[in-house]
Amino acid sequence: MPASFDVSSRSAADRSYPRERYYRPELDLVRFLAFFLVFLHHNIKDDPNSFGRDVWWAYPMAAFSNACAFGLALFFTLSAFLICELLLREKQHSGTVRLSSFYVRRILRIWPLYFLGLAIGCLIALYRHETRDLALFGAYALMLGNWFNIFFHFTGNPMAVLWSISIEEQFYLVCPIAVRQFSRRGLYILCGAFLVVANFALLVLGNRGSSPLNVWFNSMVQFQFFAVGMLISLTLGGAAPKLSTPLRVAMIGASMPLLWGACYVFHALQAAPIRSAPQLMVGYALAAIACALIIVGSLGLPARVIPGWAVWLGKISFGLYVYHALAINVVSSLPPFFLTKGAVPFLLRFSAKLALTIIFAALSYRYFETFFLRLKGHFEVVRSRPI
């Protein structure tokens, strides 16, 4: 039987979402994959002894490192898919979207750990006597961190990676209101508008010769990944695609070459050779396609092929993301003998950084985040992942 999407033959407007808890463990696998890509990016990019700079494969490896940064875009795509999916289910059952409940749920899930991360960042800034970073974290607290980085400075503080939460929160200002007010057709149009604005931004930034980081920090650029996530939810209509396991594996496997090609061939996130606007637009489009392939390929993945440890790590992935740069900094401050060149020392550093990140995140989830997640459950209209 050819692969097909398991969606109803009824019109999109008449599709009915099941009322039971919406939880797919395979999406925890995607969460962990997104984190792991970001973790790879920061380890290869920031470790001066991870690979040679004068060997023939230095540029392809740099492209691989930058490709891994698109793990953050995968986070955005997955977040938009899940938020849109839950809001559509809520609207199906109650006839509306309760904005107050939505924002309370998001605050309870994001803000406690986020502001703890900002507090840690401020303490590190004071310890290092880098007081200008306090203004940075002030902008982060106002959910304007990405724009602050564009117009002022980006810092080496390990909590500076939390700039992405600003973009996530900006999306939350739009999505629930749009789902509440618009029909499905209106949401499709909104997603199309996001894509148009993102590509216009890439056109302008590319023609101006903006730095790769300033392109990366731009909310309008990143909103294309939210649009892709919403489009997946709208198109599937609450169902999982009915695909063979080999095809799913092939879709997920094809994503990494696409991301690498986006950086190596089209120079997305790559400073040299000189980029152009069309290159940027194609590069980011390939990244968006790769994110869509991962999510669509993962939805409905048989439980037997999903490692339990990966699901657990996906469950604590927010903590993994918040603490990973701190863990990298801690390990990087170890005595010099641990920082020598070579594959074995690099793997030792990598393993130590990953282990410490997992320890930080597991403790945080168990003794800090769980309290707020239980409170969050009281405001859920459609139950999601169990604690």
Image: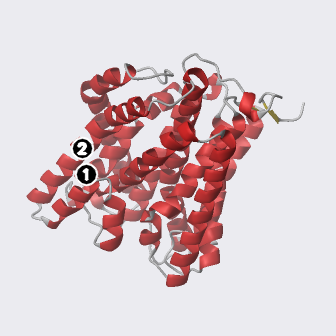
Q: Are marks 2 and 1 in contact (CB under 8 Å)?
A: yes
Q: Which residue is more in the foreground, 89 or 208?
A: 89
Picture disc at residue 115:
2
Residue at 45%, 20% in the rendered image: 386
Q: Counting other residues with Cα less than 10 Å from the Cα at mark 2, is it few (<14), some (14-19), or many (20 or more)? A: some
In the picture shown, does residue 231 fall above or below 54?
above
| Quadrant placement of the N terminus | top right
Picture disc at residue 26:
none
SS for callout 1: helix
Residue 374 image offset from top left, x and y in percent: 33, 20
Picture disc at residue 141:
1
Residue at 42%, 71% in the rendered image: 214
Instruction: State how far apart marks 2 and 1 are (Cα).
Output: 7 Å
Q: How is the image coloured?
A: secondary structure
Of all residues, the one furthest to the right in this rendering is 1
Q: Counting other residues with Cα less than 10 Å from the Cα at mark 1, is it few (<14), some (14-19), or many (20 or more)? A: some
